Amino acid sequence: MGKEGTMKTLCRVLLIMLLVAVIASFAALPALAAEEDEVAPEQASSTMDVKTAKAFSAGGLIAIAAGAGAVSMAIAIAKSAESTARQPEASGSIRSNLLLGLVVLETAIIYALIVAILIIFVL
């Protein structure tokens, strides 16, 4: 697989990660339906349901993003090792491209962490 194939694979993985993050963030929508300020004692279980929904959506978002990121990083590292084995003279260029790709993947995971924190504390 050439450089174009690797870039297509990386783009597909990033697109899937973005799609999963958006779907997981929709799991927090029930938390938006109830306001915690106007809770009567008989609605206390409803408030706990909202908190539970927040916890599950935040945990699911982080789990999916971290798992997809780990798989993506493993694929990128494996491909760079194969490329270095085939062309040792291009190892510097391969390494710099690998590190740039890993930084982008890690940034996507950190964004998912920020969204999860916002789900828990802001919504």
Image (cartoon, rainbow, N blue to C red):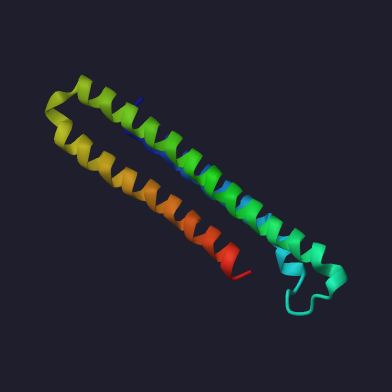
Residue pushed farthest front?
Answer: 41
Percent coordinates x, y for residue 28 in the rendering: 67, 59
Residue pushed farthest left?
Answer: 89
The answer to whether residue 86 is above or below residue 54 is above
In percent of the image, x 16 and y 31: which residue is there?
91
Residue pushed farthest right?
Answer: 42
Left or right of 26 on screen, residue 101: left
Percent coordinates x, y for residue 108 in the rendering: 44, 52
Percent coordinates x, y for residue 92 in the rendering: 15, 36
Asked if residue 8 shows in the view, the reply is no
Asked if residue 44 shows in the view, the reply is yes
Count the numbered circles shown. Answer: 0
In percent of the image, x 38 and y 38: which residue is there?
7
Q: Quadrant of the C terminus?
A: bottom right
Query: In front here: 2 or 80?
Result: 80
Left or right of 71 on screen, residue 96: left
Q: Quadrant of residue 54?
A: bottom right
Q: Quadrant of residue 48?
A: bottom right
Query: In front here: 3 or 45?
Result: 45
Q: Quadrant of residue 34?
A: bottom right
The answer to whether residue 73 is above or below residue 103 is above
In percent of the image, x 59 and y 63: which residue is there?
120
Q: Quadrant of the N terminus?
A: top left
Percent coordinates x, y for residue 2 in the rendering: 33, 28
Left or right of 95 on screen, residue 34: right
Query: In front here: 1 or 68?
Result: 68
Left or right of 112 on screen, residue 10: left
Residue pushed farthest top?
Answer: 86
In percent of the image, x 43 and y 37: which residue is there?
70
